[in-house]
Amino acid sequence: NPNVLFVIAGSGDMEAKIIEKAAELEIANKVVFTGFLTGKDVDKMYNLADLYVMPSVSEPFGITPLEALSNNTPVLISKQSGVSEVLHHALKVDFWDVNQMANKILAVLQYPELYHNLKVNGKKEVIRFNWQIPALKCIDLYKDLIEFHKIVGFNDFPPGYNKPKYITDIPFFNRYPGYHHMCAFWFRNIYFQPRILVGNVTFLMRLDTDSI
């Protein structure tokens, strides 16, 4: 398709190689490198695009497809990205299958109905990804941790838990009473009761080597 224009936004250690590759393939006039973008420029770029492509080899999650969908831009993502597990109204392809990737890019550009469906349904889907929800969960977690500290304190255990005698024999107890008391408590329960439920939150604690 002679009307296709690729826009590569961002920067990184492979930027120079990609620019050289575009020149080598004689498609430099079809590829625009914007460099690193921030703020409103990012939204403008999404709005200008007919399709956002994230062909990541590995991506723990990948928030940029959500940004694209929020700007009414359909997305094509690699199956190896974490976000592919939660997005349904998105085109997906293995990162190594460049032929399939090219076919899907052209399909979005050639078939208005496909473009429209991805755009509308993707926008509806991304609405449920609300930062307020995980933020409120974090706040609730901190509140529960504070309450848990009030219950446990440094000298008492929650109801139903007996103080192990050997806690008072820990060499560092007198020097660091609170810290090592808590570590000893978790050391005892990591085997017998590794999870403690306070409210609706389950707590786990990592043991430090100097606590054993």
Image (cartoon, rainbow, N blue to C red):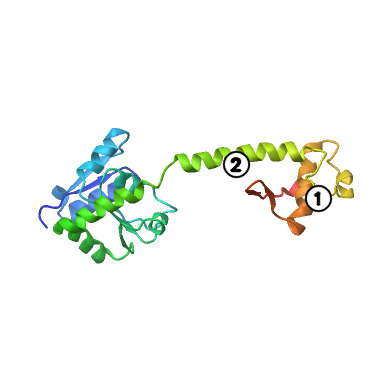
Q: Nearer the viewer, mark 2 or mark 1?
A: 1
Residue 208 in sight here: yes
Q: Residue furthest left?
A: 2
Mark 2: amino acid: Leu
Q: Which amino acid type is marked by label 1? A: Gly
Is 23 left, or right, of 177 in this rendering? left
Rendering coords of residue 33 (x, y %): 23, 43
Q: Which residue is mark 1?
A: 160
Q: Nearer the viewer, residue 30 or 201?
A: 201
On screen, residue 124 above or below 150 = below
| Disc 2 to disc 1: CB gap under 8 Å | no
* Residue picked out by circle 2: 141
Residue at image position (62%, 48%) is 200
- Helix, strand or loop at mark 1: loop
- Quadrant of residue 193 in the image? bottom right
Nearest to N terminus: mark 2 or mark 1: 2
- SS of the residue under disc 2: helix
